[in-house]
Amino acid sequence: MPKSKSTRKNAAGKFAIAILAAGKGTRLKSRYPKVLHEVGGKPMLEHVIASARKVVAPEDIYVIIGHEAELVKRRVGATGVNFVLQAEQRGTGHAIMVAKDALSQYDRFLVLSGDVPLIWAGTIERLRDFHREQKAAMTILTAEVENPHGYGRIVRKEGKSAELAAIVEQKALTRKQRNLREVNSGIYAFESRPLFARISKLKTDNAHKEFYLTDMAGLLVRDKQKVVALPAMNPEEVLGSNTRLELSMLDQHLRMAKCYELMAEGVTIYKPETCVIDSGVEIAPDTVIEPFVQVLGKSKIGGECRVRSYTVIEDCEIGDGVEVRHHSVLQHARVEAKAIIGPFSRLRPGSEIGEGAHVGNFVETKKTRLGKGSKANHLAYLGDALIGDQVNIGAGTITCNFDGVEKHPTAIDDNAFVGSNSTLVAPVRIGSGSYVGAGSVVTDNVPADSLALGRSRQVVKEGWAKERREKMAAK
Ligand code: UD1
Ligand code: CA
């Protein structure tokens, strides 16, 4: 959280990281701030903060916020970074003006962009080190990208040096400059003194009537200060996202990177381009992920599992050797080793499926423990239930856990057998080793080892159908 102004002495020799995150993101046409839009299942700003935190402590990170500032703060506040408010967003140069008090305590600092989320910690360190080696006043991380449209272009000085003359924004490019493919990533290193000595010289005489931080390059060069460019090793790392199309491309990029990482760790993923796996997911070796699977949030999947197509797993813990068959939806659930789920199962939050248990098609569970080796293979609703080991739940069984006002628990003890189409009206307990006859409505507890029949007895009227046919024929 915001620190009291530390003395310049404490900050000397250290460097800070500023993250520009105040902009509205007009081109996304969204009511939410751009930097909170998600790629790889996480807001862009969170990715940037995570990389920055690998390089400096959170108290040396300054996130510049403005548009929907409270929302942004709430979302990433727990990371412990500082926030600087840019109440009016008058450009990237203005964002740094606003942060002057915080940043001028440091000899040098880096600027990252909240909408350039793929940046690696290693690249941030490379930029920091290159900047110091070069003894530059400003160092710009650049990249040669396939489609440079929309980016500021790098105009180098004559000759082959790393030094550059200026950064020219898209709208100000001359026809000749439009062919330049080296772009400004929006990521820089600055020496504080030369920057803040000139920051008031930035002007708004441009297409957007904004203070451009990019103009600082030209200002410094004019005063014979050294401005250099460092090309990123991996150009994809500096891709920005101003539009929904760019967002989806970044998302795809991150998803593929996650799949490749898992594959390298021994997971088989068929058609990874069809899978959506969040960056926080862990999967152990020899697990097979079939096409069109989503594994989201903080899910953890053991080894030698098989997750079949069209399944969605969110924030679940899944043991070894589990098979999740087609079209299952699992949320905040725990599944122990060798269980079989699906096809078409729905495990809602608080479901706990024991070792070797089976949950079959059209079975829904919620806040329910299904013990070791127990089976609910077809068409059931099991809510607020504690079910023991080796229990059989017949097709069509329902726990009536809700009386219209409150929820009530059902207990089904070890080795019980619940016949098909049973209605268990909670609170109720089915004792161990007992039987519930098919079609029963069970309102009272069933003692261990007994049989409960909660239905009227069958009546057989012999010859009835034959008599009826004869009567009809006589008419
Ligand atoms: C900027 C660069 C461009 C570069 C590109 C790389 C400028 C003038 N241009 O363009 O050279 O190629 O990034 O992605 O800098 N922001 C604020 N306060 C503001 C305005 C913006 O904090 O007043 C933040 C935005 O939230 C965003 C970042 O600064 O995170 C960049 O702003 P954006 O408007 O996206 O700049 P680009 O047009 O992409
Ligand atoms: Ca941008």
Image (cartoon, grey):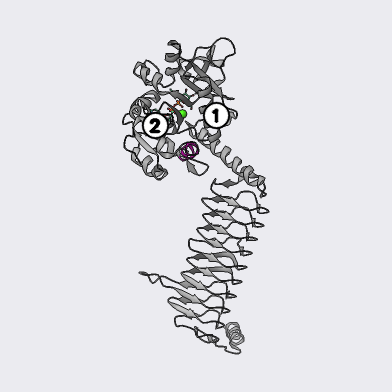
Q: Which percent across, then down, holds residue 410? A: 46, 74
Indicate the quadrant where residue 378 lies: bottom right
Residue 187 among magenta residues: no
Indicate the quadrant where residue 160 lies: top right
Name the kind of residue labelled 1 in the image: Arg
Residue 58 placement, left or right of 413 = left
In the rendered image of this protein, does residue 449 appear above or below residue 155?
below
**Residue 89 shows which numbered tag?**
none
Residue 327 placement, left or right of 425 = right
Location of the N terminus by quadrant is top left
Residue 435 placement, left or right of 98 = right
Q: Which of these two is toward me, 142 or 374? A: 142
Q: Which of these two is toward me, 346 or 227? A: 227
Q: Which percent across, then down, holds residue 85? A: 33, 33
Q: Which percent across, then down, holds residue 377? A: 60, 69
- Tell which circle, 1 or 2, labels the residue nearer the N-terminal end: 2
Q: Residues within 10 Å of mark 2 (few under 14, many from 20)?
A: some
Separation (CA) of disc 1 from disc 2: 21 Å
**Residue 11 shows which numbered tag?**
2
- Looking at the rendered image, the disc whose residue lies closer to the viewer, 1 or 2, is 2
Question: Does mark 2 have its CB less than 8 Å from ligand 1?
Answer: no
Range of magenta residues: 46-54
Q: Is residue 236 visible?
A: yes
In the rendered image of this protein, does residue 171 appear above or below residue 393?
above
Q: Secondary structure at mark 1?
A: helix
Q: Which residue is mark 1?
A: 126
Q: Is residue 211 visible?
A: no
Indicate the quadrant where residue 58 lies: top left
Q: Residues within 10 Å of mark 1 (few under 14, many from 20)?
A: some
Q: Main secondary structure of the magenta part?
A: helix
Location of the C terminus by quadrant is bottom right
